[in-house]
Amino acid sequence: MRQIVLATTNPGKIKEFRALLPEDIDVVSLMELGLEAPEETGETFAENAEIKSVAVSRSVPLLVVADDSGLEVDALGGDPGVRSARFAGEPADDRRNIEKLLGLMSGTAGSERGARFQCAVSVAWDGREVLQALGSCDGSIGYDPRGSDGFGYDPIFVLPTGRTMAELTAEEKNEISHRSRAFRAVAEPLRALIEELDPAGGGCR
């Protein structure tokens, strides 16, 4: 079975990514490898994704896929942006992040609550980036959390349909999410790379 590394320890991301790939590709996470993600020092999602994929690819003889994603809110000048995961400080905590964001948005009219999820995906091999793609999903910030699925800001991210991202099934989310759009953009070239590096299917070792 062909293997690739997803440079994350986030169970939600791992689940979403595995669902987007064929069953003959085995996704190995940083947790399974006993590795830690490097510090994200970039100023954009694309820079952070590349930092992670390239750094991890220097430690493993496999293709490495990394993403960086977050929420941009118009009324906050694009914040929390690349600080989305730790918006409320360390350690990262979804509930505290949501509470802080809703507090900052208090009194903001519905017409001014526009927002978007952004995602950059980077694929690296042997210490260099070989693929990159971007994906986005537009919506707005709700007034209260709704829904029990998803993670991060999903419960307060309202789609044009009126449902929050956390009210979607996994299948529905994978049709429209920023991450799935970015992952799908690299899926075919990624499969071609896997075949090129590992035509026998034994893992890119």
Image (cartoon, rainbow, N blue to C red):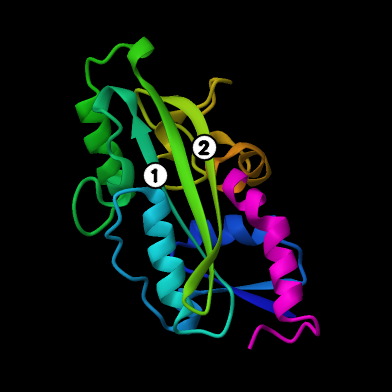
Q: Nearer the viewer, residue 112 or 170?
A: 112
Q: Nearer the viewer, residue 136 or 157?
A: 136
Q: Residue 78 falls in which quadrant of the image?
A: top left
- Residue bearing the label numbered 1: 70
Q: Position of residue 158 (x, y in %)?
A: 47, 26
Q: CA distance from mark 2 to mark 1?
A: 10 Å
At 67% from the left edge and 40% from the top edge, which residue is drawn? 175
Q: Which residues are magenta?
A: 181-205
Work out whether 99 lies above or below 23. above
Disc 1 crowd rating (10 Å Cα; few below 14, some 14-19, many 20+) is: many
Q: Is residue 197 left or right of residue 75?
A: right
Specify the principal SS of the magenta part. Answer: helix
Residue 163 appears in the rendering: yes
Q: Which mark is residue 93?
A: none
At 36% from the left edge and 12% from the top edge, which residue is drawn? 110
Mark 2: amino acid: Ser
Q: Nearer the viewer, residue 161 or 125?
A: 125
Q: Is residue 147 left or right of residue 188?
A: left
Q: Position of residue 3 (x, y in %)?
A: 66, 77
Q: Residue 196 falls in which quadrant of the image?
A: bottom right
State which quarter of the image contains the N terminus.
bottom right
Of helix, strand and loop, which one carries label 1? strand
Mark 1: amino acid: Gly
Q: Position of residue 96 (x, y in %)?
A: 25, 45
- The extreme right residue here reads 200
Q: Residue 35 falls in which quadrant of the image?
A: bottom left
Residue 8 appears in the rendering: no
Q: Is residue 142 left or right of residue 172?
A: left
Of helix, strand and loop, which one carries label 2? strand
Q: Position of residue 99 (x, y in %)?
A: 25, 37
- Residue bearing the label numbered 2: 136
